[in-house]
Image (cartoon, rainbow, N blue to C red):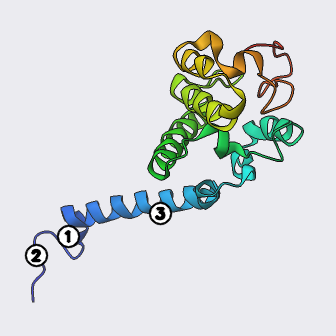
Amino acid sequence: MTPTKKGAFGWLRHPGFLVAIGVGLFVGFSVYTFFYAHGLSYLSSDPKACANCHIMNRQFDSWTKSSHHTVAVCVDCHLPTSFIGKYIAKADNGYRHSMAFTLQNFHEPIQIIDRNSDILQKNCVRCHKGIIHPLLISSVMDRQELACVHCHQGVGHGEYVGLGRNDQTVGEIP
C-alpha cells in the first residue's frame, strides 16, 4: 500500500474533521460556562440564583431586609407569570446580562430596561389589585409617571442601593 499525496495525516485537513473540532470546542466551552455560572439555578425561583453573579449581592441583601421578602421572590416581581413568557424573559435577561457582565459595558448602577419595567408594573398591579382603585389601574398601565415604583421605590429592595459603587444617588430611579 502506498501513501497518498496527502500523507498519513491527510484526514486532519478534511472539512468534516475541522467542523467536528469546532463544534466540539463550542459545546465544551458552552457546557463549562453553563456549569461554572450555575446555569441550572436560573431555571428555579430561588432568589439566591439572582445573586450568583456578585454584581447582584447588594440587591439580594436589600431584598432580604425589604417588606416583600416574606411574600415575594425575585421572579414574582421581575418576570411574567405565564410559563412561556417567564422563560422567554429569563432567556432574554440571561443573554443580555451575561453579555453585559462579560464585556463590562453596563450602566452603573444597573438600570431596569423598559420591557422589564413594564413586567414589574404589571406584577405590582396584579398582586395589589384589591387595594388599587380601578381608574388608577388603567392610568398606571399607560403612564410611566404613575408607575408604582415612582412612589414605592424601596418596597422590593428596601432602601435603594446601586451596584458596584458606594457613591450612588439616593432616590435615583433604576
Query: Dot 2 corresponds to which residue?
Result: 4
- Looking at the picture, how far across and down is residue 124, in whole percent? 66, 32
**Label 3 vs label 2, nearer the camera:** 3
Query: Left or right: 140 with respect to 25?
Result: right
Q: Relative to 54, say whether 143 is above or below.
A: above
- The C terminus sits in image quarter: top right
The nearer-to-camera label among 2 and 1 is: 1
Label 2: element kind: loop
Q: Do labels 2 and 1 touch, CB within 8 Å?
A: yes
Residue pointed to by mark 3 = 28
Quadrant of the rendered structure where residue 68 is? top right
The disc labelled 3 sits on which kind of residue? Answer: Gly
**Residue found farthest to the bottom:** 1
Identify the residue at image location x=24%, y=73%: 9
Q: CA distance from mark 3 to mark 1?
A: 25 Å
Q: Residues within 10 Å of mark 1 (few under 14, many from 20)?
A: few
Seen from the viewer's position, the closer of residues 109 and 21 is 109
The quadrant in which residue 1 appears is: bottom left
Res. 67 image quadrant: top right
Image coordinates for residue 115, horizontal then vertical, percent = 51, 27
Question: In the rendering, at what x and y percent does residue 110 appear?
Answer: 67, 25
Please provide percent x and percent y for residue 130.
Answer: 69, 34
The answer for how far apart the CA atoms under marks 2 and 1 are is: 8 Å
Whether residue 108 can be seen here: no
Q: Which residue is mark 1?
A: 10
User: Does 89 appear above or below 140?
Assistant: below
Q: Nearer the viewer, residue 109 or 32?
A: 109
